[in-house]
Amino acid sequence: MKYTVTLAEALGGITVNITTLDGRELSIPVNDIISPGYELVVDKAGMPIANEPRNRGDLKINFEVKFPTKMTTEQTATIKRALGG
């Protein structure tokens, strides 16, 4: 599953709300820093395993980070200060 986050969400954390293919609603907190290509694996939250209906596979969420295309001078200065640049 692919999920797009903003740069602020990638750095500051987010709760991912997902509707699975079988209709379940999941709310998954992500407190790690999300870098481009980051993959989160949620154990036993995926689809049921064939011939083992009580067991589920893992849910894999691949993240895409949407970077801003432009920022004001003030925003750039604020980010540089925050990140020690």
Image (tube, rainbow, N blue to C red):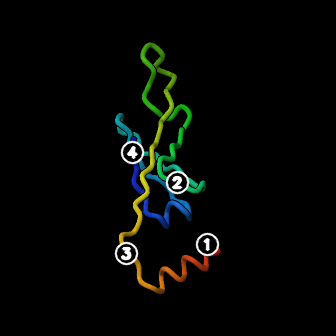
Q: Amino acid at mark 2?
A: Ser
The answer to whether mark 1 and mark 3 are in CB contact below 8 A is: no
C-alpha span from label 1 to label 3? 18 Å
Dot 1 surroundings within 10 Å: few (below 14), some, or many (20 or more)? few
Position above or below: 66 against 58: below
45 horizontally vs 71: left or right? right
| x and y percentages locating residue 71 in the rendered image | 41, 78
Q: Residue at x 53, y 54 (%)?
A: 34
Residue, disc 2: 35
Q: What percent of the width, then of the height, locates residue 42?
A: 54, 38
Q: How many marks?
A: 4
Of label 1 and label 3, which has the lower sequence position? Answer: 3
Judge the density around disc 4: few (<14), some (14-19), many (≥20) Cα neighbours within 10 Å.
few
Farthest residue toward the front? 85
Mark 4 vs mark 2: give the one in front.
Answer: 2
Mark 4 → mark 2, Cα distance in angstroms: 14 Å
Could you tell me how far apart the alpha carbons at marks 3 and 2 are, in whole angstroms? Answer: 19 Å
First in sequence: mark 3 vs mark 2: 2
- Label 1 residue SS: loop
Mark 4 or 1: in front is: 1
- Name the residue that disc number 3 marks: 70
Report the residue at 47% width, 81% height from top. 75
Three-letter residue code for mark 1 = Leu
Please determine whether, in this image, residue 29 is positioned above or below residue 80.
Answer: above
Q: Position of residue 53 (x, y in %)?
A: 46, 20
Decide: marks 3, 4 in contact (CB < 8 A)?
Answer: no
Residue highlighted by disc 1: 83
Tag 4: amino acid:
Lys
